[in-house]
């Protein structure tokens, strides 16, 4: 996690380059769905295959529902009361989940709500029953192959995490009781599923302002969730080492632009930041090791009309979909693993009740599915698009003379006039270059556009070769040097577009997203240190295709 904190800063420079690597063991970023279309287990059993085939997600938050023999309905979405549950009530729900064949939905979570908030902190029986229900949810998640639980601390009823000064206890005394309950609750869910992902919609971020206070309790006393840090400390007291706790950062709804996401992630994760000051000293090492940052998106903000309090408009000259993609990309770059997308007015799947009037998100915001796919994993999305373009013969290579039938379209620059660039029987040939490159510029390009870039090379003798993308503004001045993109040549690359690679040749390829402030994209095949005699590199099959 310490590395991931620092990588947030680096991602500002590295976040616009994407590729696939067989050696890449970094966590795959995953997008999770939650909304008013939340599925129950019966719906999942009937429709899980279609849901996986038609949506851009890696999992869902689901409702665990049951009906008791007396006809009363019970749900994980409304479970914080003193009513105990009989595991037998959930046999059908468990069987439903076991019948599901998960393919693309690899990370599914049972939604557990602190609603309606009817268990008092000093109610031992009520807490025993609430913890028993949580244990049952964790057991079912473990037994049915789900990733874990998704917790919403908002009670949608009594404000249980707000300190009540008239309750007869001091703030310190109340924190001690709340911390004990947090420990009890964690022990209940960890006993059957110690290595789960515990996905909270929010936990540290909601009180991060108190971390800027030299005495955080002075601020926490008056905050709506001022007792949540005490409960969280109890959770950390008992959290097993293999559990990962995700701070879903529901305030991500309102973030706009990379800087806001990055600052929030640093505030939550940094070992010197405000959030960790709300963690007891004995739990801080565990916090750094086991807590991950995520971000929530309120998709309705991108479809609501202007003037709505929840409205996110387009950037100048762009669309609301462009804005969504920019913010989703920023969230992906700064989150550890997860981004979750919440929606209300529209749906991703058809309701069970045919009488319910509904609208698909794709109809409300055309192109949203592909936008989410690109923001989540540009390389995978590009691979699909390139396959379609190749199949339909629609891919337009924007480079002039990409097959090097001669040297037309390409310029040659070198630091010292020692080497040469020439056409050589259908390939570009660079020999005895100490430091230089061949290059070609493409304009205009617009911020937010995605391009596939590739080049093949074959080397003889010494020297190094790489493929570099650089940027200029509309006045052809060099800009954004920190966002130059560098691709290495590999003899066995993970091929994004499936083109064959001739024997003895290597390929550099990847995806670039045009950064803000760039109007010209320049492709450079860089060569250096060809100091030995007969050092030569041949280049061929240059490709630049706009993906979207």
Image: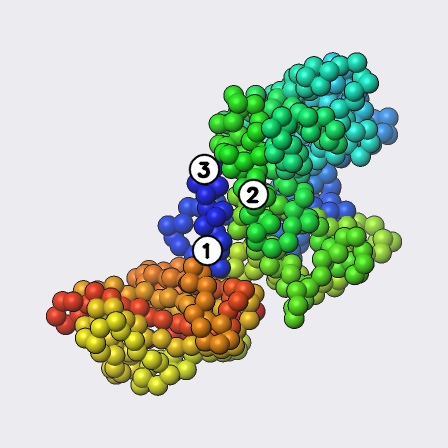
Question: Label 1: how many residues lie within 10 Å, few (<14), some (14-19) or many (20+)?
Answer: some
Q: Which badge, 3 or 1, comes first in the chain's sequence?
A: 3
Q: Is residue 336 visible?
A: yes
The answer to whether 291 appears left or right of 316 in the picture is left
**Camera-nearest residue between 110 and 3:** 3
Name the spot of residue 469 as percent of width and height, x first: 41, 67
The reply to whether callout 2 and callout 1 are in contact (CB within 8 Å) is no
**Marker disc for residue 217:** none
Whether residues under marks 3 and 1 lie with C-beta atoms below 8 angstroms apart, the answer is: no
Residue 515: x and y in percent read: 52, 64
The residue positioned farthest toward the front in the image shown: 214
Look at the numbered disc 1 and give the secondary structure of its residue.
helix
Query: In the rendered image, which quarter is residue 97 located in?
Result: top right
Instruction: Give the number of the disc on residue 13.
Output: 1
**Is residue 419 in view from this perspective?**
no
**Mark 2 crowdedness (10 Å alpha carbons): few <14, some 14-19, many ≥20:** many
The image shows residue 408 at horizontal and vertical percentages of 35, 86
Q: Which one is earlier in the sequence, the residue at label 3 or at label 2?
A: 3
Mark 2 highlights which residue? 265
Q: Residue at x 54, y 42 (%)?
A: 266
Question: Badge 3 is on which residue?
Answer: 2
Tell me the SS state at disc 2: helix
- Give the Cα distance between marks 3 and 2: 12 Å
- Spatial CA distance of label 3 from label 1 is 18 Å
Crowdedness of circle 3 by 10 Å Cα count: few (<14), some, many (20+)?
few
* x 64%, y 41%: residue: 249
Left or right: residue 277 compared with residue 15:
right
Query: Dividing the image into 4 quarters, which one contains the C terminus?
Result: bottom right
Which one is earlier in the sequence, the residue at label 2 or at label 1? 1
């Amino acid at each position: 996690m310490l590395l991931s904190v620092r990588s947030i800063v680096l991602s500002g420079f590295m976040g616009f380059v994407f590729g696939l690597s067989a050696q890449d063991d970094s966590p795959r970023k995953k997008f999770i769905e939650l909304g008013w279309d939340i599925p129950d287990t019966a719906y999942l059993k009937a429709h899980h295959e279609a849901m996986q085939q038609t949506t851009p997600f890696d999992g869902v938050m689901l409702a665990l529902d049951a009906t008791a023999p007396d006809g009363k309905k019970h749900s994980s979405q409304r479970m914080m009361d003193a009513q105990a549950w009989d595991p037998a009530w959930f046999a059908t729900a468990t069987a439903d989940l076991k019948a599901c064949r998960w393919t693309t939905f690899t990370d599914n979570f049972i939604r557990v709500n602190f609603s309606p908030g009817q268990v008092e902190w000093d109610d031992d029986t009520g807490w025993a029953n609430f913890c028993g229900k949580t244990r049952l949810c964790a057991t079912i998640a473990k037994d049915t192959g789900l990733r874990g639980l998704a917790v919403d601390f908002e009670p949608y009823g009594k404000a249980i995490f707000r300190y009540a000064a008239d309750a007869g206890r001091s703030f310190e005394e109340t924190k001690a009781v709340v911390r004990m309950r947090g420990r009890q609750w964690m022990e209940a869910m960890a006993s059957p599923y110690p290595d789960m992902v515990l996905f909270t919609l929010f936990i540290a971020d909601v009180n991060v302002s108190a971390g800027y206070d030299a005495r955080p309790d002075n601020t926490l006393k008056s905050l709506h969730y001022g007792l949540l840090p005490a409960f969280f400390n109890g959770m950390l007291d008992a959290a097993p080492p293999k559990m990962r706790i995700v701070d879903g950062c529901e305030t991500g709804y309102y973030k706009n632009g990379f800087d806001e996401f990055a600052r929030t992630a640093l505030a939550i994760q940094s070992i010197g930041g405000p959030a960790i000051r709300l963690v007891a000293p004995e739990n801080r090492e565990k916090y750094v090791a086991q807590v991950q940052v995520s971000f929530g998106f309120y998709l309705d903000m991108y479809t609501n009309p202007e003037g709505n309090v929840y409205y996110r408009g387009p950037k100048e000259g762009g669309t609301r979909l462009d804005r969504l993609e920019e913010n989703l990309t920023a969230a992906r770059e700064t989150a550890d693993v997860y981004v979750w997308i919440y929606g209300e007015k529209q749906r991703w799947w058809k309701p069970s009740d045919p009488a319910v009037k509904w609208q698909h998100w794709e109809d409300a915001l055309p192109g949203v599915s592909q936008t989410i796919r690109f923001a989540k994993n540009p390389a995978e999305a590009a691979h699909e698009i390139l396959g379609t373009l190749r199949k339909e013969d629609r891919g337009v290579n924007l480079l002039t003379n990409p097959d090097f039938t001669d040297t037309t379209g390409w310029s040659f620059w070198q630091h010292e006039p020692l080497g040469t660039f020439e056409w050589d029987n259908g390939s570009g040939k660079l020999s005895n270059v100490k430091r230089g490159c061949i290059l070609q510029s493409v304009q205009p390009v617009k911020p937010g556009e995605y391009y596939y870039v590739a080049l093949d090379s074959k080397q003889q003798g010494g020297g190094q070769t790489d493929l570099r993308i650089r940027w200029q503004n509309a006045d052809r001045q060099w800009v954004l040097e920190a966002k130059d993109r560098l691709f290495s040549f590999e003899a066995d690359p993970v091929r994004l577009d499936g083109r064959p690679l001739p024997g003895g040749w290597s390929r550099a390829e990847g995806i670039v997203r045009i950064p803000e402030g760039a109007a010209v994209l320049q492709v450079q095949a860089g060569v250096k240190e060809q100091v030995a005699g007969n050092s030569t590199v041949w280049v061929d099959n240059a490709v630049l295709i706009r993906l979207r």
